[in-house]
Amino acid sequence: MAAEHTELQESPEYTTVAVIGAGPAGLTVANLLRRSGIDCVVLERRSRERVAQRQRAGIVETRAVRMFDSWGLADQVLDGPPSDGLLEFRMDGESHLVSDDDGSDGPRARLCPQQVLVQRLTAAYLADGGDLRFEVADISLDDLVGDRPTVRYRTADGTLRAITCAFVAGCDGDHGISRAAVPNGVLTTHTFDHGIGWLTVLADAPPRPAPSSPSVRTASPPTSPAARTPAVTTFSAHPTTIPTPGPIAASGRPCAPGSPTPLSSPARSPTAKSSGSEASSTTPCSTAASSSSATPPTSSLPWAAKA
């Protein structure tokens, strides 16, 4: 068995910006840096396959679409039809259509599943000569307030490497290593809790037709169908009780707030592809849900949906 690598195997390399995280934020930053002639290295702890398959958001909002367009990236990284700007809110069993059109000219929001966006951002970055390193471990960030921050990490074969840089772009999320590495007294945060916990299921179910055929659907209590593709819809439920984050597993149909009676009888039972929750809760009715977005697909999960 080969001895474990515990020391640097070569001298630290240098790049202008070290980007931590190869999600939509990190890959967007990396693409814009490359197009600005600024060298960078992107480090991601997961495999390329895992990153390319993560299902999260399903829409690229208007400002992001216009940003990609202004950088000449829209045709490369965006896929899916544009949104027609109509939002469907279902409250107490009634549907309400609201337009999010601000009256400005230019490209509109696009329906584009996050995994598709990430795959295309990855391809664009690599095609432009970008340096993207997957499956790195034990990332540490040192001397962030100095002139030459250092990023240390371990490769998949156990080799310890270091990168010195002028800047570190922490794009690994609220619970990532970047945020935790910021020294006390340097980071200023502002938090506002809206008191909303969403329970979400991604299902093999075409979006329900509605007046004017809204292509994007979001909602407040109790259910929210949001189109992902012509055959896939995200269903969300806002519980009547503000939840404490934690795992749950239940099945059934969404109910009107405060009532054990389902809002409607399902026209069919779509199959859940994967599911997740911003937070869990106990409600007076059963809800179709799972504990996290990383939960494997469920073979059959009933959900109230009028097709």
Image: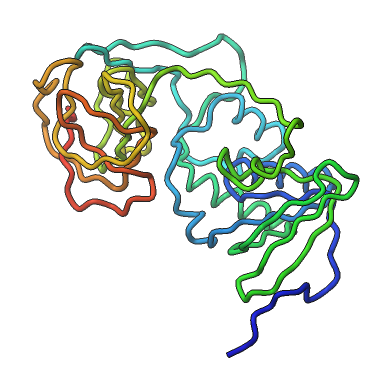
Q: Is residue 58 left or right of residue 237?
A: right
Q: In this view, does 54 lie to the left or right of 221?
A: right
Q: Residue 21: x, y in percent? A: 62, 49
Q: Looking at the figure, which quarter contains the N terminus? A: bottom right
Which residue is more in the foreground, 122 or 195? 195
Which residue is more in the foreground, 27 or 112? 27
Q: In this view, does 44 lie to the left or right of 290?
A: right
Q: Residue 118: x, y in percent? A: 55, 48
Determine the residue positioned at 80% across, 48% down. Answer: 17
- Decide: is 198 above or below 289: above
Which residue is more in the foreground, 39 or 69? 39
Label total for image:
0
Residue that lies at the very extreme toward the bottom in this rendered image = 1
- Decide: is 3 above or below 61: below
Is residue 155 visible in the rendered structure shown here?
Answer: yes
Q: Residue 142: x, y in percent? A: 78, 51
- Decide: is 203 above or below 142: above
Q: Quadrant of residue 254?
A: top left
